[in-house]
């Protein structure tokens, strides 16, 4: 068994498959206890950013649910099936099957209304990339432009071949979202002002 498979190796740039992260939740005695990113980091031996990226990808797939706890904390868990949803029509609100993080409805409305080029699946991917960028900023309240390009773009390229082209679309939309501020200094540090 390789070192990374046993969780003792280094993160190697996020080489952990989503199944390995999900196994951290499934292979425990207390399945009801939510886990933190630190729990995943400790178990897999990966970086905080890798843990967050993989956890958020699992949330997007509906395999995990998440919520913010305290000022800067967040926990993840495997959601229980909602038996009530079987009685609803497939297009009824709340029946998409995917667990979504607790987000301000104003943020979701702004993301849905953001002026982003594209149509159909491309536009959906670009809105997901904007959402992932916003989520990254809310979890890392003083993020730099470089961090967005190295931490968010690889998981959410949204049809762009280069990070620079991706950022040219995401940056103006991000500046319009609630609780976002960018310092006009040399490093262009972005600040999340929300709670």
Image (spheres, rainbow, N blue to C red):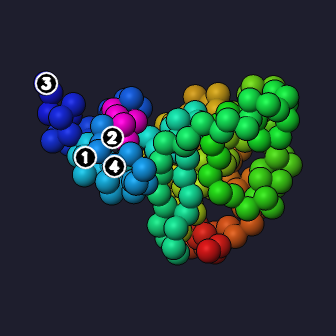
Callout 1: helix, strand or loop? helix
- The part of the chain drawn in magenta is 20-26
**Distance from Cα at disc 4 to Cα at disc 3:** 26 Å
Residue in view at x 73 percent, y 38 percent: 84
For marks 2 and 3, give the one nearer the viewer: 2
Disc 4: which residue: 30
| Label 4 or label 1, whichever comes before in sequence order | 4
Label 3 Cα neighbours within 10 Å, binned few <14 / some 14-19 / many ≥20: few
The percent coordinates of residue 192 (x first, y second) are 60, 69
Which callout, 4 or 2, points at the residue further toward the start of the chain?
A: 2
Q: Is residue 21 magenta?
A: yes
Please give the label number shown on residue 43. Answer: 1
Q: Nearer the viewer, residue 17 or 156?
A: 17
- Secondary structure predominantly adopted by residues drawn in magenta: helix
| Residue drawn at point x = 81 percent, y = 61 percent | 106
Q: In the shown orientation, is residue 151 left or right of residue 176?
A: left
**Badge 1: residue crowd in 10 Å (few <14, some 14–19, many ≥20):** some
Closer to us: 125 or 172: 125
Front: mark 4 or 3? 4
Q: Between disc 3 and disc 1, whose residue precedes?
A: 3
Residues at badges 1 and 2 in contact (C-beta under 8 Å)? yes
- Circle 2 sits on which residue? 24
In terms of sequence position, does the residue under pointer 4 or pointer 3 come before the other? 3
Q: Is residue 169 above or below residue 143?
A: above
Circle 4 residues within 10 Å: few <14, some 14–19, many ≥20: few
In the image, taking residue 2 as reference, residue 157 lies left or right, namely right
């Amino acid at each position: 068994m390789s070192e990374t498979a046993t969780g003792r190796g280094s993160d190697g740039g996020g080489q952990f498959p989503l199944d390995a992260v999900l196994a951290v939740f499934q292979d425990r005695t207390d399945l009801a206890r939510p886990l933190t990113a630190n729990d995943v980091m400790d178990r897999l031996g990966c970086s905080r950013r890798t843990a967050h990226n993989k956890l958020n990808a699992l949330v997007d797939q509906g395999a995990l649910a998440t919520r913010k706890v305290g000022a800067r904390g967040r926990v993840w868990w495997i959601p229980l099936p909602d038996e009530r949803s079987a009685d609803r029509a497939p297009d009824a609100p709340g029946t998409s099957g995917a667990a979504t993080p607790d987000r301000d409805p104003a943020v979701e409305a702004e993301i849905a209304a953001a002026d982003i080029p594209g149509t159909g699946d491309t536009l959906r991917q670009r809105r997901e990339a904007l959402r992932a960028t916003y989520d990254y900023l809310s979890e890392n309240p003083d993020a730099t432009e470089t961090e967005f390009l190295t931490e968010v773009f690889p998981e959410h390229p949204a049809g762009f071949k280069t990070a620079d082209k991706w950022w040219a679309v995401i940056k103006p939309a991000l500046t319009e979202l609630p609780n976002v501020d960018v310092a006009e200094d040399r490093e262009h540090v972005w600040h999340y002002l929300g709670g």
